[in-house]
Amino acid sequence: MAAAADKSRKPDPSKDKDKDKDPAAKPRRSMLATVLIAVIAAGGAGGAVWYFTQGHADAAPAKAKAAAPATPAPAQYFALDPAFVVNLSGRLDGPRYLQVEVQLMTRDPEALPALQTHAPAIRARLLMLFSQVEPEQIADRAGKEKLQAAALAEVQKLMMAETGKKTADDLLFTSFVTQ
């Protein structure tokens, strides 16, 4: 009879509510767990990004300092005195002259004594070069710059043969007169 009584009994509504809560609670718990995992993962990723960028930020200035070019040594000048005066080769319209003052520039402090030692040979080579110039070749700026480059190449060639170094970094015309 107890079994029959159990069948005739109405089900308890509070037990049905517990059954309803359990299926609804499981999706909420899994959703909460998913959100919690996502937040932890995002925090970990953000922390990793911060950590790795901090490490590279310290290394970047060191690399930039190492890659920055060093300040060049101060320029030193050596004047080839007196001024060069040569006859220019040219047409039959009379003798033409070139007077040019030359200074050599170097950044190597050890090169200045070598330039002084070999000054007579440098003067001889430049005299030969300047005497081969025709007036039309040096009439404009481009011609003067070409002559200046040729003179520097001549000096560097001589110094390379004598000392094993170019020694002269630049050749400057500080006065340039044609007549």
Image (spheres, rainbow, N blue to C red):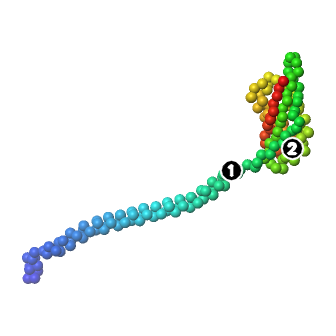
Asked if residue 150 can be seen in this view, the reply is no
Q: Earlier in the sequence, mark 1 or mark 2?
A: 1
The residue type indicated by label 1 comes to Pro
Which one is nearer the viewer's eye here, 71 or 178? 178
| Spot occupied by residue 50 in the image (x, y as percentages of width and height) | 50, 61
Residue under the point 66% across and 51% down: 68
Q: Which residue is mark 1?
A: 69
Q: Is residue 39 left or right of residue 98?
A: left
| Spot occupied by residue 94 in the image (x, y as percentages of width and height) | 88, 18
Give residue 115's mark: 2
Q: Is residue 56 above or below residue 150?
A: below
Q: Is residue 56 above or below residue 126?
A: below
Residue under the point 88% across and 28% down: 86
Residue under the point 11% across and 79% down: 6
Q: Nearest to the eye among marks 1 and 2: give it.
A: 2
| Residue 174 in which image quadrant | top right
